[in-house]
Image (spheres, rainbow, N blue to C red):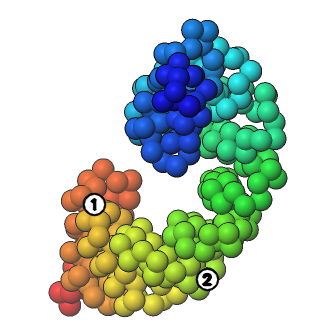
Amino acid sequence: AIRLDSNYVNAYFKRGTAYLQTGNYQKALVDLTGAIRLKHDPLSWPYNNRGLAYYKLKKYEQALDDFNRASELDPDYAEAFNNRGLTLLILGDDKQAAADFSRTIELDPTNYPNAYNNRGWIYYLHENYEQALADFARTVELDPNYVLAYQNQGLTYAAIGNYSQAVDSYSHAIELSPDNTNNYNGRGDSYFKLGNYEQAAADFSRAVELDPTFAVAYHNRGLAYTNLEKNEPAIADYNRAIELDPTDVFAYLDRGLAHRAAGHFNEAVSDLETYLELAPNVSNRNEIEALILELKAETNQ
């Protein structure tokens, strides 16, 4: 159709949309731009789809311009508001992004579960946990397989200290996505806060099995082992955490305390001194300095 009539706007739009759906974003841009240029009375949907192509290419400012134009041309275009919200979220404008997700929900309350999830995430970031939980609950009501919403729900429950509910949310996420390391780490942390150190260690073990470079999970498993009085495995995990992330100052503190519990006083002193050197303004400085003096006295006996 395009070869026969270069002014056939719908053909450009349809082919551009097909390119968009198959991941050929550069060709999508060419055709959708052609559709926009040939249409004398502009329509919203070519701008929206070209904005999506820009978004996929991480050209967020151009995407924003197109979503702005689409929403101007059709103030009831829910998809354009949702897409603009996603773009604004990436660009760091949380307030306007939340407004766009709210507008999306107002226009179409049932077909955009990601609008609820993303608005909930903004609420979470701004510590509005009650509204965040309401949005995550609505997300999974609309889409029971929405893994990220369960993960976000787990984070939010943990933030308010409801660790049992956090475990339930992370468990849902793990059931749906059994290879997601963050969900094992998050559930492990909630088990840890509940005092279930064995289960916490099991979840952290699964996390590092899936990702052997997951420094935080090694540190967390070290803490679980420490609380289980398994000092040597704990020290090994702190070693790995520090190897992967030498800036983790608390790993030096926790390894020092594990060395102390294991009777390795010289190593404990070295780690605790490193901790104070890396974090000179910590609130527990006086306590740690007193412990170092005590350990040095032990080594001199």
Q: Is residue 26 visible?
A: yes
Q: Quadrant for residue 122, please give it.
A: top right
- The image position of residue 54, as x and y in percent, is 45, 33
The extreme left residue here reads 300
- State the separation of the CA atoms marked 1 and 2: 27 Å
Q: Residue 127: which numbered mark, if any?
A: none
Among the 4 quarters of the image, the one containing residue 189? bottom right
Label 1 neighbour load within 10 Å: few <14, some 14-19, many 20+: few
Query: Is the Cβ of the residue at disc 1 closer than 8 Å to that at disc 2?
Result: no
Tell me the SS state at disc 1.
loop
Q: Residue at x 43, y 25 (%)?
A: 62
Q: Position of residue 107 (x, y in %)?
A: 78, 27
Whole-percent x, y for residue 124 in the image: 62, 43
Which residue occupies 60% across, 13% down?
42
| Label drawn at residue 199 | 2
Residue shown at the point (57%, 8%) measured from the top left? 40
Residue 169, quarter of the rendered image: bottom right
Judge from the rendering whether residue 138 lies leftward or rightward of residue 177; answer left or right: right
Q: Callout 2: few (<14), some (14-19), or many (20+) C-alpha neighbours within 10 Å?
A: some
**Between disc 1 and disc 2, whose residue precedes?**
2
Q: Position of residue 96 (x, y in %)?
A: 58, 24
Viewer-nearest residue: 48 or 184: 48
